[in-house]
Image (cartoon, coloured by chain):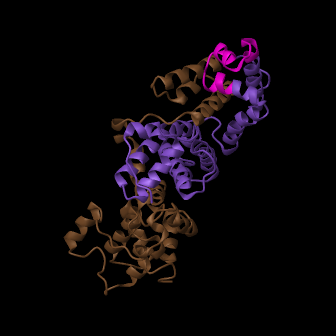
Chain colours: A brown, B purple
Amino acid sequence: MADVQRLFSDFIAADRSGGDPEPLGYLERVKGTDRAELEALIDAYLARAPRRAFDEATFAASPSRTLRDELMHSLTGLAGAWPTLLPQLRHRAELKRSEVVERLAAELDAHGQEQKVGSYYHAMEQGLLAAAGVSDRVLKALSAILGESAEALRRAGRALAGGRSAGGPEAVFARVAQPDDQFAAEELAQGSPTMTEAGERDFIDELFTGGSDSGS
Amino acid sequence: MPAFEPESDDELQRRGDDALISYIARARDHGDLEAAGRGLAILVFGHWRNVERRVRMKVPAAHVEDVTGEIIVSAIQSAFGGASVGEFVKWLARITQRRIADFHRKPRVDEVALTGGEDDEGGTPERQLEGASEEGYVELRDAIERVLDRLSARDQQVVELRIFEDLLSAEVAERLGLTVANVDKIVSRFRRALRSALGDDGDTSS
């Protein structure tokens, strides 16, 4: 049976030398209380460990890059934490964005308007749509699809104080300037605008930009 | 509003977490999104791997990336939303602990789907991690803190330096003005208490 203290010291040495050791490789060498002790020690060590030095190449290939981009949308956008939360919930539910859009359109009785619903949903994920303008009905529909309560979704839209989500004239209505490639291509093929221009607002515009009570 | 000067990567690396978060917020408030993004990259990258490895010890591989992302997002959102308490790294550690416990508490759609599936002999992959339960995880995490809390401030220092900093007993003794024998005694007492808190029946094989 390997010695817990020696394994723990080996783990620390490997970590400090940049070896990037995996704890499970060490844990599988001990059993019972020894394993529990080693796990507790490694966990406590990692909880105390300082930030790693930045490495551009590793960062570019790491999931932390995607997360940083989503967090930037949250920190600088109109929709609070939606740019990080909505993709997370989608991944957890194992749904593609197109599947969420399809179900959202169905929940909102927006048959044949999937493109427009998709553009608005895309804007929510990108932080381009003011959270305050999105109706409770949309959030309830998303709640049923993504498995998070409508109240939690509303709170997330207000998170990150200091971002533009806090309010201001531009937070009342935001037009999607750059839909993602998928929707842009589909719109081009169908010749439809991303959203209805001012003066031609329909019930979908109301649901996504008219405020919490709209469309209820 | 005071002027904002972007800093180099080297300067940002030298900043502690809380100073880095403050820098990111100032960059954002001044509309310098490139500087904010750079600072955020250093913060997220710097913590990702340590959190990921903690998660991997208790969460099935298929969920590690999602749970790690949720933890880091939650900690950063709390820091920017003013909801975090104390140092960022301690807040991050607490959120990691809580989120892993939540993972084992909440039934997940994919777990339900796996139950009774093809992997009947060894259990589903969801259940193959030893001790992977909410109670097990909380007990494990609490054990270290509980045992540390019972020690005097000096003995806590000894354990932090000898165990978690992995200094030699002689180095700890010299730094704190103790004898080597005294350091070893304190460490030995800590490990016995820890093993006892983890349910050891007296086996001192290691």
Residue plotted at (79% across, 22% down): B202
The image position of residue A204, as x and y in percent, is 39, 80
Percent across and percent down for residue A73 are 40, 58
- Relative to B201, does residue B121 appear above or below in the rendering? below
- Residue at 38% from the left image edge and 80% from the top image edge: A205
Q: Is residue B103 magenta?
A: no
Q: Is residue A60 left or right of residue B54?
A: left
> Magenta residues?
B159-184
Please name whichever residue, B161 or B137, is drawn nearer the observer in this view of the structure: B161
Vertical arrangement, residue A152 with respect to residue B4, above or below: below
Q: Residue at x 68, y 38 (%)?
A: B141
Task: Inspect this view and state whether residue B68 appears.
Answer: no
Q: Position of residue A182 (x, y in %)?
A: 28, 62
Q: Name the image quarter holding the N terminus of chain A.
A: top right
Residue B192 can be seen, yes or no? yes
Residue lying at 67% horizontally and 45% vertically, measured from the top left: B134
Q: Main secondary structure of the magenta part?
A: helix
Q: Is residue A186 left or right of residue A127?
A: left
> Residue A171 falls in which quadrant of the image?
bottom left
Direction from residue A136 to residue B4 in the image, left or right = left
Q: Is residue A17 above or below residue A81?
A: above
Q: Is residue B171 magenta?
A: yes
Where in the figure is residue B205, as x and y percent of width and height? 72, 16
Count of number-bearing discs: 0
Q: Is A145 rendered above or below residue B83?
A: below
Front-most of residues A14 and B37: B37
The residue furthest bottom is A199
Residue extending furthest toward the front: B2
